[in-house]
Image (cartoon, helix red, strand yellow):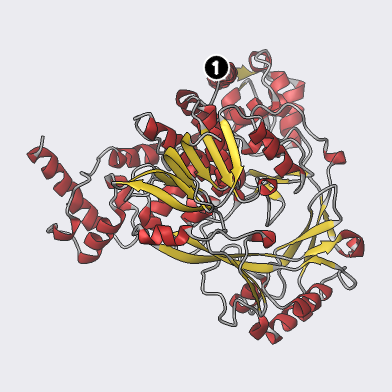
């Protein structure tokens, strides 16, 4: 084995994979170190990729040249577009993945990736020289040199699992826990904290009475995460999910046995995710809510296992049996695997910056749940950016920091380093103030230029993208300049929607802006647009840009104003604690976060506008004094 690499990635989960692939694809020798290669790309929790905001993150990863979307499109069980009755700013894809096939596809990609090696080993120490990381030490004492190291340990660092009174020193699905690295990080002066997440029981499919559940089919159409996907699984060949609800008896069983929950018995000290809580947390937090929805999700074509989404629990096994049997259609259900909670170490968010570099050490980057996040998609997005920035560090190039109006990935990283988190962070559309700019349909328009500039998008793909962009821009221009002639077809269409028959020709752009008017329905009446041969996705994007033009321009203007603050950089050596004119709380928070610009400073919780105004004056004065 080569004892020296450009980049070492510790951990083979979703963050580690994107970090390793990005490094290798950019031409750097990369080593992926994992405890168990058969678990690379594993899905220990829900067997799905995408969802609210998360689906857009997967599109962003693909637009930048990452891998998650491509692999997710290969063998999905179901593909669904969420929020179709809402505005385009919240529409997103969610796929039901084959839990066995997805990891196999990722492992195959690792084995066939140029510049990428992998080994099964445990990292217990980091090699340090003058605050600069230059490699890792393995459990057997082997030392491997590297120019940069990326830690993507997921939920494995000092992990403990809980089922009621049972407590085990293990990682997800009974895997070995990572020992030693937590002590190393603590000894390096890096602050850690305990977080917690969990998973629900898995149920044998044949033991469920699905007649008592509502069918949840996929969405028809050519839906995919990757812009390069060309093969789609017809919706009639996809596997249905189902929906049920908890019952009054379910809630009573939980309330009567809270002392048997590891979460409420005091065994678990880590903080769990607020937006993906255990079922017992839901019952305690929302005592007046009569029922909670649960989704029945198939895990694989090769197994008889159903994932009970929304029923995460750390109750004793006997209580889990009662809880499951209280659900409609589950009266005789057989539990294949019991739910459990898992507690693990993560690095506090004020220890790393927006490049995902640990502030106190050169060459050390982190990504995924070690950053305090929750979810496969969040992890993959962080892994991609950590890989890119580790490469740029060793190439002595400026780091890449995505803005809040550029990507949900940018929103997530900015939230982590600016606002921090005391619980596993989960992306939601409500976290993005510019979500109409950060849509599912336009991730390529936002990020493919950057992906090509970085080197992860090849010239052929970039040429196809530029061709698409030119067609869309031309279509928008033509729509604004072109009128649709009054015809029997147009009259019939508009009257059918409840509009008066047009008196004369109608401007194309104004026509599309009318509620319920679909460009796909009328494009055959507009020769200028029809002759552009727009595909269904290009038609959708043109319609959104026309129909929501005013709202999009307003958000773009707001983002431009924020960019002005982002462009006002703050000297890195500013002594916040001794600055006059700032409130004590502001000084303390500025010193802790160390914002790099005024925009970031303005988003720190507890900082008021007066503090920002004074900070701007201080920064300008500093720059005048030092040129």
Residue at image position (25%, 41%) is 569
Q: Residue furthest left?
A: 625
Residue shown at the point (68%, 51%) measured from the top left:
43
Front one among 464 and 396:
396
Q: Is residue 300 left or right of residue 65?
A: right
* Residue 519 x/y as whole percent: 67, 28
Q: How many marks?
A: 1
User: Residue 624 in the image: x percent, y percent?
Assistant: 10, 38
Q: Is residue 572 visible?
A: yes
Residue closest to the eye, 6 or 201: 6
In this view, 352 is above or below 7: below
Quadrant of the rendered structure where residue 336 is?
A: bottom right
Residue 281, position in %: x, y? Answer: 61, 74
Q: Residues within 10 Å of mark 1 (few under 14, many from 20)?
A: few
- The residue that disc 1 covers is 459
Q: Nearer the viewer, residue 574 or 480?
A: 574
Tell whether 385 sits left or right of 509.
left
Residue 543, relative to residue 404: is it above or below? Answer: above
The image position of residue 224, as x and y in percent, is: 69, 35
């Amino acid at each position: 084995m080569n004892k020296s690499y450009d980049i070492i990635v510790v951990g083979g989960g979703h963050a580690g994979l994107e970090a390793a692939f990005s490094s290798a694809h950019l031409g750097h020798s990369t080593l992926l170190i994992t405890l168990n290669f058969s678990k690379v790309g594993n899905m220990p929790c829900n067997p799905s990729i995408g969802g609210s905001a998360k689906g857009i993150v997967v599109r962003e990863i693909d637009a930048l040249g990452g891998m998650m979307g491509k692999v997710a499109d290969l063998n999905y069980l179901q593909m669904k577009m969420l929020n179709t009755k809402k505005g385009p700013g919240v529409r997103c894809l969610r796929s039901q993945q084959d839990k066995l096939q997805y990891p196999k596809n990722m492992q195959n990609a690792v084995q066939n990736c140029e510049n990428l090696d992998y080994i099964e080993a445990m990292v217990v120490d980091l090699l340090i020289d003058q605050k600069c990381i230059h490699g890792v030490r393995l459990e057997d004492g082997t030392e491997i040199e590297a120019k940069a190291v990326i830690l993507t340990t997921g939920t494995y660092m000092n992990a403990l699992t809980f089922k009621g009174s049972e407590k085990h020193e293990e990682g997800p699905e009974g895997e070995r826990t990572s020992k030693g690295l937590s002590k190393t990080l603590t000894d390096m002066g890096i602050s850690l904290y305990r977080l917690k997440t969990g998973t629900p029981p898995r149920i044998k499919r044949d033991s469920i009475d699905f007649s008592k559940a509502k069918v949840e089919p996929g969405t028809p159409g050519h839906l995919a995460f990757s812009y390069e996907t060309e093969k789609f699984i017809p919706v009639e060949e996809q596997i249905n999910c189902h929906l049920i609800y908890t019952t009054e008896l379910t809630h009573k069983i939980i309330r009567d046995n809270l002392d048997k929950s590891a979460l409420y018995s005091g065994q678990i000290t880590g903080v769990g995710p607020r937006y993906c809580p255990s079922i017992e947390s839901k019952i305690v937090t929302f005592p007046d809510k009569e029922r909670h929805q649960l989704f029945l999700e198939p895990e694989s074509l090769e197994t008889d296992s159903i994932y009970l989404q929304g029923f995460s629990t750390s109750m004793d096994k006997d209580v889990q049996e009662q809880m499951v049997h209280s659900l409609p259609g589950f009266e005789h259900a057989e539990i294949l695997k019991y739910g459990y909670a898992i507690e693990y170490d993560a690095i506090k968010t004020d220890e790393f910056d927006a490049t995902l570099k640990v502030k106190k050490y050169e060459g050390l980057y982190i990504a995924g749940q070690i950053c305090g996040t929750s979810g496969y998609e969040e992890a993959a997005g962080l892994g991609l950016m950590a890989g890119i920035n580790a490469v740029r560090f060793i190439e002595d190039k400026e780091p890449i920091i995505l803005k809040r109006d550029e990507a949900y990935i940018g929103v997530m990283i900015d939230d982590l380093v600016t606002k921090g988190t005391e619980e596993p962070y989960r992306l939601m559309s409500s976290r993005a103030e510019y979500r109409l700019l950060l849509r599912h349909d336009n991730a390529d328009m936002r990020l493919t230029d950057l992906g090509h500039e970085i080197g992860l998008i090849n010239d052929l793909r970039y040429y196809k993208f530029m061709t698409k962009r030119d067609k869309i821009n031309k279509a928008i221009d033509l729509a604004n300049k072109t009128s649709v002639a009054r015809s029997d077809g147009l009259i019939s269409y508009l009257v059918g929607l409840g509009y008066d028959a047009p008196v004369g020709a109608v401007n194309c752009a104004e026509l599309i802006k009318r509620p319920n008017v679909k460009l796909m329905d009328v494009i055959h009446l507009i020769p200028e647009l029809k002759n552009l041969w727009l595909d269904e996705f290009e038609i959708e994007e043109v319609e959104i840009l026309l129909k929501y033009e005013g709202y999009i321009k307003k958000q773009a203007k707001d983002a431009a104003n924020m960019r002005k603050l982002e462009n006002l950089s703050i000297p890195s050596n500013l002594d916040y604690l001794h600055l006059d004119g700032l409130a004590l709380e502001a000084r303390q928070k500025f010193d802790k976060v160390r914002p790099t610009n005024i925009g970031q400073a303005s988003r720190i919780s507890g900082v008021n506008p007066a503090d920002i105004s004074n900070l701007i004056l201080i920064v300008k004065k500093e720059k005048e004094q030092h040129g």
